[in-house]
Amino acid sequence: QVQLVESGGGLVQSGGSLRLSCAPSGNTNRIDRIGWYRQAPGKQRELVAVISSGGSANYADSVKGRFTISRDNAKNTGYLQMNSLKPEDTAVYYCSANVLYYGDLWGQGTQVTVYS
């Protein structure tokens, strides 16, 4: 069974950086769209950034200029580089990707905590 595996979350001071990674476990099928979402306690899950197979990216206004979504097609991996982190970025971050023949898959989530 194919699963998306995220890594890179953690605890960081305000102003710091983290890089999240997302890849399908045990699978090399092509990944189309990759999206990063987050859900803070008591809030709905929201889209943070999305990147197409061709590399076209879009961002939530709250992260523009601070976060960068990217992908390495050779490694079948997506990334979310998060700079200038703020306490309000604290959330569980989820990766979602459209995997060939498997459709839209979600990762288990990785916790990002930013303290001031």
Image: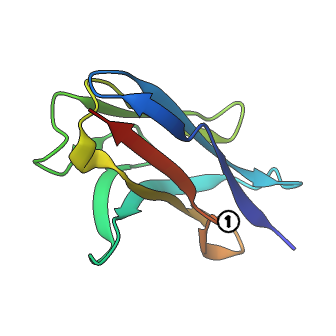
Q: Amino acid at mark 1?
A: Leu
* Residue sitting nearer the eye, 46 or 86: 86
Q: Secondary structure at mark 1?
A: loop
- 39 above or below 86? below
Asked whether, in this view, residue 28 is left or right of residue 108, the answer is right
- 97 above or below 11? below
Residue 87: horizontal and vertical position, in percent? Answer: 25, 42
Asked whether, in this view, residue 76 is left or right of residue 78, the answer is right
Residue 112: horizontal and vertical position, in percent? Answer: 46, 46
Residue depicted at x 81% and y 50%: 28
In the rendered image, which quarter contains the N terminus?
bottom right
In the rendered image, which quarter contains the C terminus?
top left
Q: Quadrant of residue 42?
A: bottom left
* Residue sitting nearer the eye, 49 or 54: 49
- 46 above or below 44? above
Which residue does the numbered mark 1 point to in the structure image? 100
* Residue sitting nearer the eye, 14 or 22: 14
Asked whether, in this view, residue 73 is left or right of residue 53, the answer is right
Residue depicted at x 33% and y 65%: 40
Q: Quadrant of residue 86?
A: top left
